[in-house]
Amino acid sequence: MAVRYIPYFPNTLEGQALLDNFVRTKRVLRYRDNDRVVENIQRGMPYYEVEPVEQVGDNPQHNMVLRGECLSACAYLKDKGIKVDLVYIDPPFASGADYAKKVYVRNNPKVAASIAQAEKELDIDELRAFEEKMYGDIWDKERYLNWMYENLMAIKSVMSDNASIYVHLDYHIGHYVKILMDEIFGEDNFRNEIIWKRSTAHNDSTGFANLHDSIYYYSKSADLYFKTPLVPYSDDYIDRYYNKTDADGRKYLDRDLSAKGLKGSGYSYVWKGKSGYWRCPLTTMERLEKENRLYYTSNGTPRYKQYLDEMEGIPAQDLWLDIFAVNSQAEERVDYATQKPEALLERIIKASSDEGMVVADFFGGSGVTAAVANRLGRRFVTSDINLNSIQTIRDRLIGGKAEFEILEVKDGVSLFRNPVQTMDKLKKMIPGLCDNEEKLDKIWAGSIVSTQYGVMPVYLPNLLDSSSRLLDKPMINRIIREALPDLPADIRRVIVYYIDITDRNDIEQFIKEQNDQTTIEIELRDLKQFLDDIVVEDDAEWTVSETHDALFTGWKVTINSFHSDRVLKKIEEVNLKGEQQVLQQKSKGKEKKFVPITISDEGLETIEWISLDCENAEKNLPWHSDVEIKRDHLGRVCLNGKKTDEFWDGSIRCDKKPLRMKIRNICGDETVWTL
């Protein structure tokens, strides 16, 4: 449950009309549930308790990575009085697409031959792998716009007065969001729609191929920070304009030195028999001659040599054709769906922030914004709801030698790696819950059959939509007025699960007062308590020993076995699906061979990352990583953020006595043990 609600903006006593812009929004862009957005913003941003997870370095700049939704992250920043100077967000595009992570099974370090085999497989793209859904970009337009409106209002509330915001979208929803941004930030504060060509030409489209994204750039006020970025000259531009070369090989273009046509300006004198008006005084012309800066045309007219090696580039325009998407071989690639190139963020960050300013990204994804901000000497704040994203960001920042802290918003939905996975599992985990029957409205997730009450429809909050997590009076009133009257006559009770609730006693009293049109009882159930009861952690066996030899003196932890029920169940599902596909192909007369994914008795193939903490022994204290190993999909070791060509031998070493160990399985679940 939210601890309290943080106002988006100062109240009217401080001189700001709190909700004036809503009238225009509902007139210009009218869609379903606008009123609910107004109610949510009048209530404020939900502020939850925030728990420190890990501290990396001394972190004097107070850089932070938060696991939580945009609204919760902004509520935390506003409560702490933290303002951001630049925001870049790459939110879901409302494209209807699912995004999956490629999960690779590593080599088994307990089998000597596996390392040699891994070396042979270095050039093989398809290893033993399966996909796991990370998040779903599946929205109806109205819900998406409500969700985006709240997020943009929250972001605006933590922006400094001279801050800017860049919102990265595509053709699916970008034109609608621009209207929202006009309302929120003001049409006068619209700066650019940047067109980024993200893809090369292809011929698989039935119409004109879609090759670009749109980035909407707004400022909070007219007093903004902006430094025009310079773009390197293209080869075509150089060939066309810098087409002359000095004796020393320097390329240059020649510029006009005459002042002809410039009314009221210029210097009148004769230069080497040429009389007229010139752009520079005689003394400057003489200096340019000595410096070999003059080029003479065939008729003897002097022109100025502008050398290519002295030019930084041309001012960037709103059409970006020179930044390419991250390809499969790129050094910066982190195997994250929708990853954006560092060059894109570098241009934005350099243009709209200076060193020491705070750069924020509330849909952190692959961590590119935080990584580039850190490299350019900016402070950073980044957040994401997906655990896989937080892990990717963390590991990327470790590789960039960044100092930061990781915080987790305790909003009650952190059982699984992301809300999509949780929603996928909920129906299977709630005892007795059957799929939604045709006779029930879509608001009901399904039903439970009870010997006492018969069929009981079940309502589940949509964890993809933050506005539905809170069970408040408007939500329960909607269930009472819209959902209950349409139920079959034999329904006697419904079950309403919630993640968060304004006040349970108040809601129950409201139900008694308002539920007078039916005889159906409403039972409230806390979904967080149910989820907490089914957490199953991974299991590991290990040995800890002191080592004193010519190569190493210190402590060594050897992992003897590791087992993850979640990973094994996922692999079972993948194998079963593969076998069914083979049978289907055979029934059609097609021969297809399926090689199932197998895991050894030791199970070390399912370990992706391991870390030792030599400072804290208690599980609930923030993590301090003294040494860590991450294995890429080929099994090669990345030691403390530095890539190597070594393969893991099943152990991890440290100088000091280790007190705790944390292991991340290949699907992203992390478990901590006291050693």
Image: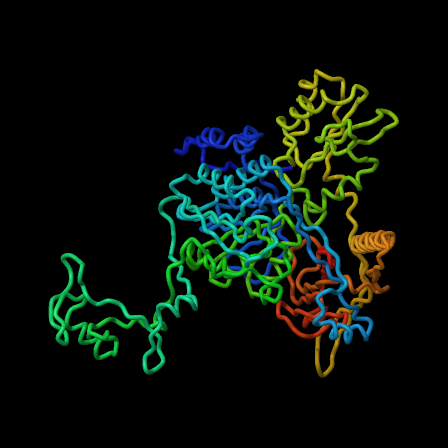
Circle count: 0
107 or 370: which is nearer to us?
107
Q: Is residue 551 above or below residue 593?
A: below
Which residue is depicted at the point 80% across and 22% down?
A: 491
The answer to which image quadrant residue 563 occupies is: bottom right
Q: In the picture, which quadrant includes the C terminus?
A: bottom right
The structure residue drawn at horizontal position 61% and vertical position 41%, both measured from the top left corner, is 48
Image coordinates of residue 453 in percent, x first then y, are: 84, 24
Q: Residue furthest top?
A: 517
In this picture the colour scheme is rainbow
Q: Which quadrant of the rendered structure holds the N terminus?
A: top right
Q: Is residue 150 left or right of residue 480?
A: left
In the figure, is residue 534 to the left or right of 621? right
Image spot of residue 32 (x, y percent): 58, 30
Q: Quadrant of residue 562?
A: bottom right
Q: Quadrant of residue 659?
A: bottom right
Whole-percent x and y of residue 111?
82, 72
Up-down relation of residue 512 to residue 554 (above or below): above
| Image position of 394 (left or right of 647) | left
